[in-house]
């Protein structure tokens, strides 16, 4: 009860992310430092995820309980009562499609403003969608002003006609509604719903990688999320439902043990590539139902893990090929997510992709607590950074509106 009384309300300077995954729910409370640009983590809350399958809510009550547990833990550690969250979404229901949008510039001086860009993106929303889908993100791929293409930022330019190629990322309406329902039942308000691979990219990718061309692959518990970047813009996204949980299930079935034991063994002894095993030690597995313990070697465990990891990476390669970026990624592939910490997975990926591969750890320009500087927290940290970036985009527009109002009253 004492802790309850000492919690203060979430202020404007405090942001919260909520990563609702298939195997875990994570809540991060943070405070951005405007002077240094650092992100200070005030509280971390995690809980096992019980009500999701392949990134989609399949049991409302269990999902609510998992969210409530993670949020309660984050509140206790931060001393802040959480009210507003930025939440990530994934699942193999996510789709990306391209559209083309055109508007006329109506300003007397023909100068393109941020309002014109907003109108152009709003025009892109008029694309015909099936009734069961909703738009998550509108991502401009490039602007064309009076026939001149290759424009990344048209604001301030002169023109009479502006066009844009826009990537529209959509999700199933029911999946988004169920996510909203779970979070609202916990008593929270959603500020943004963000595609998880986009969120992860804010945490693990460098601007140079985004510029030259890179594929971010977030291998979580229930889904593998892919986002391809070039010229600083996301060009392609895909999500499929094969990930870390399938590896755990293979170990469970192969060794005849329970899921919790399989997950622990995977994390402690798991290798994705035989050549990465330097010392093939033997470890014990407790027997089930009074049976004798078993002796298992790392190499035997790897024989179970490696085929499934190869399958996941082959699916990723197929998506990169489908997007037309097989030979257009100078920065290669960045692996993140909890499964990315399997020993040898980067070496195996490099063999399969035949391009540079590295493991991506979340970074927020310093200030991260050691416990979240881990690939499994990439999405949660990225959701925080997305929130900060969105606030920066909105503030100039607010200042511009205030300036216009001030000028209006001065003319009276």
Image (spheres, rainbow, N blue to C red):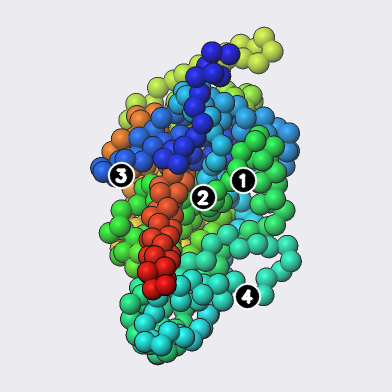
Residue at image location 52% in from the left, 66% down from the top: 138
Q: Nearer the observer, disc 2 or disc 4?
A: 4
Q: Could you say whether the residue bearing mark 2 is in a helix, strand or loop?
A: helix
Residue at image location 49% in from the left, 27% down from the top: 8
For marks 2 and 4 on the same chain, the one whose residue lies earlier in the sequence: 4
Along the line of sight, the residue nearer the viewer: 329 or 393: 393
Label disc, if present, on residue 127 of the rendered structure: 4
Placement of 365 over or under 404, stated as above or below: above
Q: Could you say whether the residue bearing mark 1 is in a helix, strand or loop?
A: loop
- Asked if residue 61 shows in the view, the reply is yes
Q: Position of residue 171 (x, y in %)?
A: 63, 58
Residue at image location 47% in from the left, 54% down from the top: 198
- The Cα–Cα distance between marks 3 and 4, rounded to whole angstroms, is 38 Å
Q: Nearer the observer, disc 1 or disc 4?
A: 4
- The Cα–Cα distance between marks 1 and 3, rounded to whole angstroms, is 34 Å
Label disc, if present, on residue 196 of the rendered structure: 2
For marks 1 and 2 on the same chain, the one whose residue lies earlier in the sequence: 1
- The Cα–Cα distance between marks 3 and 2, rounded to whole angstroms, is 25 Å
Q: Nearer the observer, disc 3 or disc 2?
A: 3
Query: Which residue is the site of mark 1?
Result: 55
For marks 1 and 4 on the same chain, the one whose residue lies earlier in the sequence: 1
Along the line of sight, the residue nearer the viewer: 210 or 323: 210
């Amino acid at each position: 009860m004492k802790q309850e009384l000492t919690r203060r309300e979430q202020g404007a300077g405090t942001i919260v992310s909520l990563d609702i995954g298939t195997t875990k729910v994570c809540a991060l409370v943070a405070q951005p430092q405007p002077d240094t640009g650092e992100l200070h983590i005030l509280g971390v809350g995690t809980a096992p995820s019980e009500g999701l399958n392949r990134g989609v809510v399949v049991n409302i009550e269990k999902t609510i309980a998992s969210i409530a547990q993670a949020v309660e833990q984050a509140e206790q550690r931060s001393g802040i009562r959480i009210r507003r969250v930025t939440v990530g979404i994934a699942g193999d229901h996510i789709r990306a499609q391209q559209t083309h949008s055109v508007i006329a510039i109506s300003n007397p001086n023909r100068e393109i403003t941020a309002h014109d860009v907003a109108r152009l993106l709003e025009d892109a929303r008029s694309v015909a969608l099936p009734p069961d889908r909703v738009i998550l993100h509108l991502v401009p791929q490039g602007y064309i002003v009076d026939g001149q293409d290759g424009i990344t930022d048209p604001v301030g330019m002169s023109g009479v006609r502006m066009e844009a190629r826009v990537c529209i990322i959509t999700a199933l309406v029911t999946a988004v509604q169920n996510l909203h329902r779970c979070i609202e039942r916990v008593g929270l308000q959603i500020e943004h719903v963000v595609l998880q691979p986009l969120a992860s990219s804010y945490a693990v990718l460098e601007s140079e990688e985004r510029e030259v061309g890179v594929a971010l692959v977030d291998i979580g518990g229930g889904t593998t999320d892919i986002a391809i970047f070039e010229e600083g813009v996301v060009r392609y996204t895909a999500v499929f439902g094969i990930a870390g949980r399938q590896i755990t299930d293979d170990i469970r079935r192969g060794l005849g043990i329970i899921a919790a034991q399989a997950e622990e063994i995977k994390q402690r002894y798991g290798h994705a590539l035989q050549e990465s095993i330097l010392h093939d030690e033997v470890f014990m597995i407790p027997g089930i139902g009074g049976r004798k313990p078993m002796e298992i070697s790392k190499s035997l465990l790897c024989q179970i893990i490696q085929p499934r990891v190869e399958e996941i990476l082959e699916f990723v390669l197929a998506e990169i090929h489908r997007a037309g970026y097989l030979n257009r990624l100078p920065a290669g592939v960045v692996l993140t997510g909890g499964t990315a910490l399997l020993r040898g997975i980067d070496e195996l990926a490099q063999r399969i992709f035949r391009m540079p591969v590295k493991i991506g750890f979340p970074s927020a320009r310093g200030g991260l607590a050691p416990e979240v500087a881990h690939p499994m927290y990439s999405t949660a940290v990225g959701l925080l950074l997305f929130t900060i970036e969105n606030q920066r985009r909105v503030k100039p527009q607010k200042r511009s509106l205030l300036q216009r109002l001030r000028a209006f009253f001065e003319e009276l």
